[in-house]
Structures are given as structure tokens and as C-alpha cells.
Image: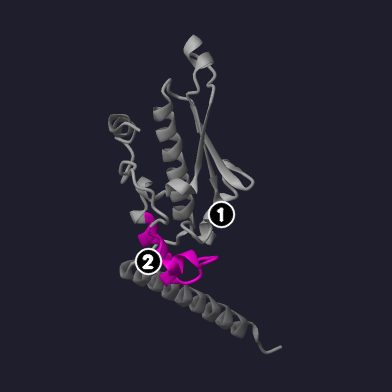
Amino acid sequence: MKRPVLERLLRHAPRARLLSTSSSAAGPAPARLLALAQLSKQDDHTLARDWINGFTLDDLPKDGYEVTYARSSGPGGQHVNKTNSKAIVRCDVHAASGVWLPPFVVAALKRSPHYHAPSLLLSSQASRKAPDNLARALLTLHTSIVDTTRGMIVGETSEEQKERVRGHVEAEQRRRRDAKDKMKSRKANRKGDY
């Protein structure tokens, strides 16, 4: 794939690097994260947040997806009728689970509109050129994984926010206690000499 094509397509993609020419066996996900079926502790969320913030397009292993090309449709005239310019990327998430993709992400990806059992199926035919379409499809795969994972991670709570919540809880307890005392005195005044 030509570098200028990718640079042009990925210009607006945040924290995306160009595809490397080497095939990596696994992404940078730590072994502890690859063993998690769900995020239950704050440490798990922190570990997942660190991983997904560093997860780039380079971290998609080349053996983690399969690329096929087909004839495109739509405008383009004879060119789209005669060339295989539509790129189709199929990522088997079950095979990736625990290898380079954490299992808790796989469970969430199953609810993705791109999921067609047992794979994520992404295609692009926006361009007349196959390399451009492949770059778009891979970028969509990367974005899908990142967005799904970020949606599962609980944000960190700052000390300032914790203090604010503590203040709200104490104020609510005081308000409730005042209301109870007021009701108590009202009921006490009902007792009369009959």
C-alpha cells in the first residue's frame, strides 16, 4: 500500500499511525487484560484505558483480519464494472479473543452493526482505488474496536468530584433529618388533652 494514500486518508484520524509492513503476532494488550472476561475492578478499567489510548492502526495484526476485493457499485462508469476496487475486511473476533483482543471487547463487538457471526465485516467502496478503500475499511475496523472499548470503560473520578458528591450526600442527609424532626414535632403537637 502506498504511503501517500494512507497519509491522505488518515490525516484526520486521531492517534493513528501508518500501517507497518511487518506482521505482528499480537497488539500491545497486556496478558492480564487478555485474560479478562469483564471489567469489574477500577484497576481493570485503568488497565483497559491505558491499552485503548495506545491502541493504533499499527496494532491490528495482519493475520488478525482477511482482505478480499470485489466489484464496486454505484457511480464510476465502466471502471467500477471492470475492476475489483471494493475492499472487504473480515475480522474473526472469536479467533482474536484472548490473542490480541481482550474477551470483554469481543462480547461488546457482538452487538456492533458490523458483526456478522463470527466476524466483523467491514467494506468500503468510496474510492475508485482499492488501496484507498482498504485503508478506509481498516480505519473503520480500528475505530469500531476503539469506540466499543471506550464505551465500556468507566471514567476516573477525581478527588474534587468525590468531595462534591460527599457534600451532596451530607446535605441530603441533613435535609432528610430536618424533615423528620419537623414531622416528629408536628405529631407531638397533636397529642392533646381530650
Q: Is residue 75 above or below residue 125?
A: above
Magenta-highlighted stretch: main secondary structure?
A: helix
Residue depth check, mark 2 versus mark 1: number of the one nearer the observer:
1
Three-letter code for the amino acid on which mark 1 is drawn: Ala
Name the spot of residue 43 as percent of width and height, x first. 41, 71
Q: Residues within 10 Å of mark 2 (few under 14, many from 20)?
A: few
In the rendering, at what x and y percent does residue 19 appear? 34, 42
The earlier-in-sequence mark between 2 and 1 is 1
Question: Which residue lies most toward the front here?
Answer: 22
Numbered label attached to residue 6: none
Label 2 sits on residue? 157
State the image coordinates of residue 179 (x, y, percent, origin top left). Answer: 52, 75
Whether 41 is among the magenta residues is yes
Numbered range of the magenta stretch: 28-52
> Residue 95 bears which disc, if any?
1
Q: How is the image coloured?
A: one colour
- Residue 50: say if magenta: yes
